[in-house]
């Protein structure tokens, strides 16, 4: 007998996969996304000086995954902006986070217990977006395994993959923050999730989509809540990735996530010697001789 039937998890997964995301889960997604925008250096100053640029950045944080996926699939990048209720909700959250009197809304949603709940709800939306992206790509390209992975990956990663473009809207250029070079946990997990959902969509993974959505959501929400509670930017995949890269590509073992994101140590400054060099002495002698000649 199937383990899921014994534990009665099949019905739970079925009901969970049918839950609507709007407005509760989407609301949490927009709040956490715009919170991360406010954490960016200089974002508050940009909001005060140029509210339009700040609003555009907020829309990219909330809907960047849809925009990029539509571009890759040959659709209109503005297609998602036809959903007025989502745009209005995200815009209201942006205004409250940046301009609420006494910063009350920001203080409430940034309070750690509240933030942990919002982070967990956001991961529910992320998993649904990955699954929907893979399904959409499978509908257009039945045998395009790589296309399914890419679209699912893009849908789950959100604005992270176009973060450099979003930074340009705020007048910042930091190419070293490219998410492809330094992948965070959500970006890595979106890639692995896209692979799993692609295998399931092509019937290579013997598990139902509802069960996979339920299990992957539980993993993402639990891991992200733990990392947020510990204020950690690490990844549970580091040890496995380190060994795999060492075996396949000869990469050195060790070196956690913190090492990749740590700032490089400043180069030692050579002490200035008080003793003049021969060139300086010769230059001084020539100047004295020229003064005597004058």
Image: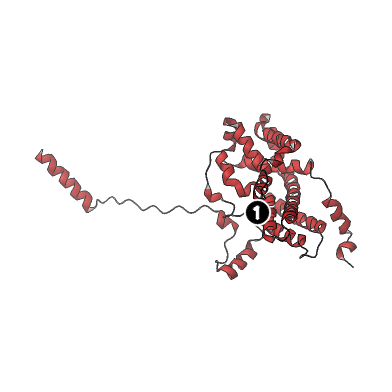
Q: Position of residue 208 (x, y in %)?
A: 82, 60
Q: Using residue 283 as the reference point, say whether residue 82 is left or right of it.
A: right
Q: Is residue 109 left or right of 44 when viewed as pictured?
A: right
Q: Residue at x 86, y 54 (%)?
A: 14
Seen at 63% across and 55% down, the residue is 234
Give the residue at the far top of this rendering: 101
212, above or below 171, in the image? below
Label 1 environment density (alpha carbons within 10 Å; few <14, some 14–19, many ≥20): many
Q: Nearer the viewer, residue 162 or 9?
A: 162
Kindly state the secondary structure of the residue where label 1 is placed.
helix
Picture coordinates of residue 133, whole percent (x, y): 72, 52
The N terminus, quarter of image: bottom right
Image quadrant assignment for residue 238: bottom right
Q: Position of residue 219 (x, y in %)?
A: 75, 56
Image quadrant containing the C terminus? top left
Please give the name of the residue rendered at 69% of the width and 50% of the height, measured from the top-left corner.
155
Q: Which residue is mark 1?
A: 187
């Amino acid at each position: 007998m199937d383990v899921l039937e014994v534990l009665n998890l099949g019905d739970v997964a079925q009901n969970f996969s049918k839950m609507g995301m709007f407005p509760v889960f989407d609301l949490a997604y927009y709040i956490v996304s715009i919170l991360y925008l406010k954490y960016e250096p200089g974002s508050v100053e940009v909001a005060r000086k140029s509210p339009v640029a700040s609003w555009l950045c907020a829309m990219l944080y909330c809907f960047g995954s849809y925009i990029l996926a539509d571009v890759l699939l040959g659709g209109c990048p503005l297609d998602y902006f036809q959903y007025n209720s989502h745009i209005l909700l995200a815009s209201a959250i942006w205004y409250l986070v940046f301009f609420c009197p006494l910063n009350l809304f920001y203080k409430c949603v940034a309070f750690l217990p509240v933030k942990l709940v919002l982070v967990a709800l956001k991961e529910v939306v992320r998993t649904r977006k990955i699954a929907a992206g893979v399904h959409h790509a499978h509908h257009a390209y039945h045998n395009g395994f790589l296309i399914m992975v890419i679209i699912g990956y893009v849908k789950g990663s959100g604005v992270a993959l176009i973060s450099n473009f979003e930074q340009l809207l705020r007048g910042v250029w930091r190419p070293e923050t490219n998410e492809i070079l330094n992948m965070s946990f959500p970006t890595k997990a979106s890639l692995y999730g896209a692979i799993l959902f692609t295998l399931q969509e092509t019937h290579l993974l013997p598990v139902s989509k509802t069960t996979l959505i339920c299990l992957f959501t539980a993993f993402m929400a639990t891991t992200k809540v733990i990392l947020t509670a510990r204020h950690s930017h690490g990844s549970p995949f580091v040890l496995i990735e380190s060994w795999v890269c060492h075996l396949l590509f000869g990469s050195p073992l060790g070196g956690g996530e913190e090492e990749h994101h740590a700032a490089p140590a400043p180069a030692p400054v050579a002490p200035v010697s008080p003793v003049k060099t021969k060139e300086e002495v010769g230059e001084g002698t020539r100047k004295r001789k020229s003064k005597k000649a004058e």
